[in-house]
Image (cartoon, coloured by chain):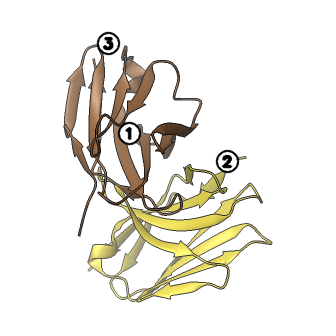
Amino acid sequence: EPEVTQTPSHQVTQMGQEVILRCVPISNHLYFYWYRQILGQKVEFLVSFYNNEISEKSEIFDDQFSVERPDGSNFTLKIRSTKLEDSAMYFCASGRTSYEQYFGPGTRLTVT
Amino acid sequence: RKEVEQDPGPFNVPEGATVAFNCTYSNSASQSFFWYRQDCRKEPKLLMSVYSSGNEDGRFTAQLNRASQYISLLIRDSKLSDSATYLCVVNMNTDKLIFGTGTRLQVFP
């Protein structure tokens, strides 16, 4: 069964550094998403991406965040200057439609 | 008021028991409803969509009451492997899923 994959599984970075989180969505999916989950809290929507552009973003997704689909398979989330409060689990998701979303295993980001 | 509200639990039940979780949502414009399952430090996994007529998938039954803005999940014949956090999720015909904080279930032998 095809799955969403994410790399790395764990990323440690210093405050102020840039990080890029990578995702390979399921191959025939058209909708792509990033969510985050701070430890002990609920899963929160960050951004959705369809037809090579952002279709929706949350208040969390400010100018420090960007997404890209550089080729036909990868989908990336970049945080330009990380803050301590960016420490969280970041989940990529994809779907054939916008209604059913399948999540990757996540990247745990630790900002020190 | 929270967009999606769930009892955090934990619900501790013996194997073979029937357990029910409830969830309320605040926005009547919500269009699609789901239950996801999340194991500790893992990704949410889609358990089932919830339809107005109610739907069943094996031991799992989901119900939706639009008038009361209420969703439920019933698990029959609980297994040890059902131990997880169950996430109530709604969608308002936009791209984003809105998650509840989850209800933790612990099934013991």
Residue B25: % across, % down: 68, 59
Position of residue B91 in the picture relative to residue B39 (left or right): right
| Residue in view at x 67 percent, y 56 percent | B92
Instruction: Tell me the CA gap for discs 2 and 1.
Output: 19 Å
In the rendered view of the protein, which quadrant contains the N terminus of chain A? Answer: bottom left
Instruction: Tell me the CA gap for discs 3 and 1.
Output: 18 Å
- Residue type at numbered disc 2: Lys
Give the letter of the yellow chain.
B
Q: What element carries label 3?
A: loop
| Residue in view at x 44 percent, y 42 percent | A35
- Residue type at numbered disc 1: Leu
Label 3 environment density (alpha carbons within 10 Å; few <14, some 14–19, many ≥20): some
Disc 3 to disc 1: CB gap under 8 Å: no
Foreground residue among B15 and A43: A43
| Residue in view at x 40 percent, y 31 percent | A67
- Chain bearing mark 3: A
Camera-nearest label, 3 or 1: 3
- Chain bearing mark 1: A
The residue identified by callout 1 is A39
The residue identified by callout 2 is B2
Foreground residue among A16 and B6: A16
Chain A colour? Answer: brown
Residue B94: % across, % down: 63, 51
Sequence order check, earlier mark of 3 and 1? 3
- Chain bearing mark 2: B
